[in-house]
Image (cartoon, coloured by chain):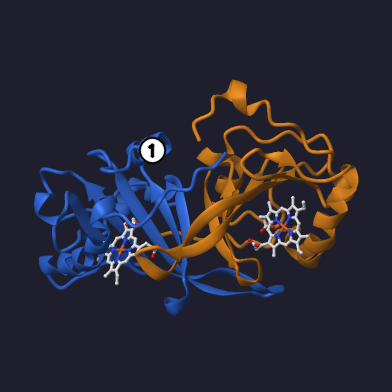
Chain colours: A orange, B blue
Amino acid sequence: ATLAWAEQSTVAPAPNGITIPEGYKDWRLIAVTQRPETNTLRAILGNDVAIAAARAGNTNPWPDGAVLAKVVVKQKNHPRYPTAQVPGEFVHAEFMIKDSAKFASTGGWGFARWLGEKLEPYGKDANFVQECVGCHTTVQQTDWVFTAPISLP
Amino acid sequence: ATLAWAEQSTVAPAPNGITIPEGYKDWRLIAVTQRPETNTLRAILGNDVAIAAARAGNTNPWPDGAVLAKVVVKQKNHPRYPTAQVPGEFVHAEFMIKDSAKFASTGGWGFARWLGEKLEPYGKDANFVQECVGCHTTVQQTDWVFTAPISLP
């Protein structure tokens, strides 16, 4: 949990060449979500560009340079308070990187995912992004992003 | 969502005199939780002292100066992907502030909560903390804290 950059950089790039965004676990909160069908809890975090855009309501489209991270963990009952669903095992971290020129063919976003504690790149080859795009097309009218940022007072 | 400090400071203190921790919405992630019985999603965030302690596994006891924030939102179905439970209305923000001398009578933690977008202080008088303490006593063996921090790789 306290890897220095030298260690982090040993994470292999995704099959489409995207490298894991450095320091994502220090990013600030955009939203919290839950998926009953997979028994998972998720946090959506944003880099500084994304946070500034979210707070300014400037998210359709999100600006170039914005990066959204989603970290997914299994949920489990709290041992002393069983109705509370709390984080279990880490499942994956995934990212959307906004660069409307570079990623023009996929809605302006670069997609990548790393699995498990070892952060193994997801996907056999670069075509894995078709899976991401296939689902995120559902929200094309909100710049391919499902999440509406929480507005904290 | 982008209040300057001058505006934030108009939030009234809790009945026990605790003032709302400045800048809590910029704090980093400790955990994500969900409560089916209240239909709410929660993010637990920590100030720098808390994040350092969480990453070092130094949480029993948490060090003086650590502050934990919990932000609670209603959950709702995503309009375009209904199984996904996503943030709705903001419910409250609440805090535990570790100062083992100052808050010796309540496990070393100061408790406070603010309700709704207007951040109205919770509690008729300083005795509201008995409600917090009553429930958090369940986890006295983990320094009165329910949350085990997520360890992100």
Look at the image and tell me whether residue A117 can be seen: yes
**Amino acid under disc 1:** Gly
Residue A138 as seen in the image, left or right of residue A38: right
Query: Badge 1 is on which residue?
Result: B57
The relative height of residue B53 versus residue A29 in the rendered view (above or below) is: above
Quarter of the view holding residue A37:
bottom right
At mark 1, the secondary structure is loop
Quarter of the view holding residue B51:
top left
Residue B53 as seen in the image, left or right of residue A18: left
The relative height of residue A152 versus residue A62 in the rendered view (above or below) is: below
Q: Position of residue A55 (x, y in %)?
A: 53, 53
In this orientation, which residue lies closer to the viewer: B133 or B95? Answer: B133
Residue at 65 percent of width and 45 percent of height: A116
Residue at 15 percent of width and 44 percent of height: B100
Residue at 30 percent of width and 46 percent of height: B67
Residue at 11 percent of width and 65 percent of height: B126
